[in-house]
């Protein structure tokens, strides 16, 4: 009972610190909420739309003009200019005025009607991967539709039925199934990695900051004295209020994206509760561990910042981990966000049982237990170290 009373007194002390220090107010509430609403609104449409493209139409016939109109009618493409030459269209791409252009050479319609297989070219910039890939898909579709339309008209003139025409133009029908994200929404799978990653960054930093400020303001000995110099009750009392605040923030985020914005989630609500809990505890565990490795406010926060930023790249959402070099694949296991993202993909996004992601769950539990490796060093630092700016 004495231990519980000491933890309670440390919690009251920590709540007073949280109320008086504006850093906690901004980094635990204001900035995470700003990040949450910023990223969900940034990709609110799911996919980028009305991306600027150009047309180089040297044929200038009704057929070539219909191709331009069809391209402009696509949701993701918007024809903003017609250029007299390929050179000028290429310069427009270099000036970032357009992402790509469709080139229709002179005589295209004539060759098409004579079945002499004309060539239509499309150029797109892959400097921006998402824009380049989506526009390439649109321009490829336009090229295919243009030849199919002329072929359809020719075959109808020769007396073919619609079924015969369809079989000739498309011998194999493609039945496409996009599992879990049929809208190909960037918001559904990027936001659910970036926002938790940013929240984990704030948890890393605040965990290391709250320990480092005890040394900075020379209050560490008074803090430990409240628990008779026992470091475990002192840490529990210090971080329990923060844990409750972080859990409220994370569960608020999950409710907002999965039940207000209606992001796809096939897993049960209890899986979301469990995922949010281990996300917060693993992040706090890493932050405390980073301070234990480097009992310095500046160095521990630098380690947390570096690890959180690298986590975005190593999570596997932008570039698959299985496509990375062997050493990088092994290194990815050292990032909590990687395991969070895999559990989310397996158990929430696709609805598989947690046993399918047990290794990633065990890895996050290991991050939760990391502070046990450095509690002795943290206690020694709080009792004997002198803060050096």
Image (cartoon, rainbow, N blue to C red):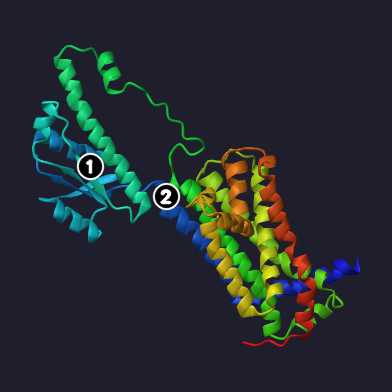
At 43% from the left edge and 41% from the top edge, which residue is drawn?
184
Q: Distance between the residues labelled 2 and 1?
A: 22 Å
Residue 75 visible in the picture: no
Q: Mark 1 points at which residue?
A: 72
At 42% from the left edge and 49% from the top edge, which residue is drawn?
44
x and y percentages locating residue 290 in the rendered image? 67, 70
Nearer to the camera, 349 or 361: 361
Q: Is residue 325 left or right of residue 55?
A: right
Nearer to the camera, 234 or 349: 349
Mark identifier at residue 44: 2
User: In what element is the residue under mark 1?
Assistant: helix
Q: Circle 1: is it few (<14), some (14-19), or many (20+) Cα within 10 Å?
A: many
x and y percentages locating residue 307 in the rendered image? 58, 66
Nearer to the camera, 313 or 267: 313
x and y percentages locating residue 332 in the rendered image? 59, 56
Q: Vertically, is 248 above or below 386?
A: above
Q: Circle 2: is it few (<14), some (14-19), or many (20+) Cα within 10 Å?
A: some
At 60% from the left edge and 59% from the top edge, which residue is drawn?
331
Residue 376 visible in the picture: yes
At 19% from the left edge and 39% from the top edge, which residue is drawn?
120
């Amino acid at each position: 009972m004495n231990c519980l009373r000491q933890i309670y007194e440390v919690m009251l002390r920590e709540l007073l610190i949280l109320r008086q220090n504006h850093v906690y107010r901004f980094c635990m509430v204001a900035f995470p909420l700003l990040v949450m609403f910023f990223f969900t609104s940034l990709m609110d449409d799911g996919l980028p739309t009305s991306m600027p493209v150009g047309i180089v139409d040297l044929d200038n016939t009704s057929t070539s003009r219909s191709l331009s109109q069809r391209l402009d009618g696509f949701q993701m493409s918007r024809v903003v200019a017609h250029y007299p030459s390929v050179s000028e269209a290429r310069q427009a791409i270099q000036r970032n005025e357009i992402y790509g252009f469709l080139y229709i050479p002179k005589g295209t319609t004539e060759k098409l009607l004579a079945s002499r297989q004309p060539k239509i070219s499309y150029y797109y910039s892959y400097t921006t991967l998402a824009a380049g890939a989506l526009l390439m898909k649109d321009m490829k579709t336009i090229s295919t539709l243009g030849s199919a339309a002329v072929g359809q008209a020719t075959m109808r003139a020769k007396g073919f039925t619609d079924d015969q025409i369809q079989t000739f133009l498309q011998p194999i029908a493609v039945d496409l199934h996009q599992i879990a994200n049929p809208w190909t929404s960037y918001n559904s799978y990027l936001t659910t990695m970036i926002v938790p990653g940013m929240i984990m960054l704030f948890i890393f930093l605040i965990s290391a900051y709250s320990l480092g400020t005890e040394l900075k303001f020379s209050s560490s000995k008074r803090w430990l004295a409240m628990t008779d110099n026992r470091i475990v009750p002192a840490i529990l009392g210090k971080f329990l209020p923060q844990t409750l605040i972080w859990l409220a923030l994370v569960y608020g985020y999950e409710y907002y994206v999965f039940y207000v914005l209606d992001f796809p989630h096939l897993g049960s609500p209890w899986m979301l509760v469990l995922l949010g809990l281990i996300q917060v505890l693993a992040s706090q565990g890493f932050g405390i561990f980073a301070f234990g490795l480097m009992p310095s406010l500046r160095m521990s926060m630098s380690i947390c910042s570096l690890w959180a930023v690298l986590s975005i790249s190593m999570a596997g959402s932008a570039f698959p981990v299985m496509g990375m070099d062997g050493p990088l694949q092994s290194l990815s296991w050292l990032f909590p966000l990687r395991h969070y993202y895999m559990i989310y993909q397996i158990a929430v996004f696709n609805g598989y049982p947690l046993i399918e992601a047990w290794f990633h769950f065990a890895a996050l539990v290991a991050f939760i237990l990391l502070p046990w490796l450095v509690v002795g060093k943290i206690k020694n630092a709080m009792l004997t170290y002198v803060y050096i700016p």
